Image: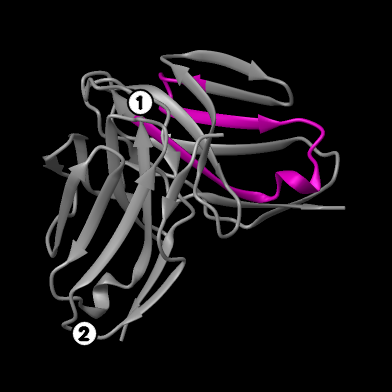
Amino acid sequence: QKEVEQDPGPLSVPEGAIVSLNCTYSNSAFQYFMWYRQYSRKGPELLMYTYSSGNKEDGRFTAQVDKSSKYISLFIRDSQPSDSATYLCAMSVQSNYQLIWGAGTKLIIKP
Amino acid sequence: DVKVTQSSRYLVKRTGEKVFLECVQDMDHENMFWYRQDPGLGLRLIYFSYDVKMKEKGDIPEGYSVSREKKERFSLILESASTNQTSMYLCASSLSSAITTNEKLFFGSGTQLSVL
């Protein structure tokens, strides 16, 4: 079993919909949680960064961490075709530099 | 604008060849990383460097070596390329000099390597 699980998709939704992307994990020691966005033929770029539990909002994006369920989510409101990309979750233990990555979910927003 | 540049976008090599992948960052970052990205497996860390001439093994260092002679440049070397090293290789850098902190990673656009 992988340490971080992420549905590969593709997830296809119409423009304007609310998108929910999720990752589950097995290591309860994880405290830092990140979402990266990767456009086709590009490297990943950091989208959201959360420490421990709770929500964090940035514009149309909300990152949510539920440590009791070992589950993190990324919500995208008013989705746009420009949001079409692969979304990677990543997480780490506080004292460990090493990020553990999900395999990524491919998201397609249809105009 | 911050930039991590990988020298080649696509490479095709033959089994047994020695392969060099080059990465340059212009942000004066302390840390540099090499990952490989395979479908269904996510990113896996091969090596990282937290200072010039310093290197640490990641999760999958076998068959690879690295070189960091200058702060801005981090090279990945496949000593004898094999077909199972066909993959997307991503270079990244981050600012912090403390390897135990988590800093934002800046990635290059990747090198798609095919070993035939």
Q: Let me know if marks 1 and 2 both belong to one chain.
A: yes
Q: Residues within 10 Å of mark 2 (few under 14, many from 20)?
A: some
Residue B11 occupies quadrant:
bottom left
Q: Position of residue A65 (x, y in %)?
A: 49, 21
**Quadrant showing the C terminus of chain B:** bottom left
Name the residue at 31% across, 28% down: A92
Task: Please state if A47 lies on the left or on the right of B98 as rendered.
Answer: right
- Quick one: label 1 or label 2, which is nearer the N terminus? 2
The part of the chain drawn in magenta is: A65-91
Which disc number belongs to residue B15?
2
**What residue lies at 80% left-to-right and 42% top-to-bottom?**
A80
The chain carrying label 2 is B
The x and y percentages for residue B72 are: 31, 40
Magenta highlight on residue A79: yes
In front: label 1 or label 2: 1
In the image, residue A3 lies at what x, y percent?
Answer: 30, 41
Most foreground residue, A41 or A72? A41
Residue B29 in magenta? Answer: no
Q: Point out which mark residue B95 bears.
A: 1
B36 lies above or below A33: below
* Pointer 1 chain: B
Q: Mark 1 falls on what kind of element?
A: loop
Identify the image quadrant of residue B98.
Answer: top left
Q: Is residue B51 above or below residue B39?
A: above
The amino acid at mark 1 is Leu
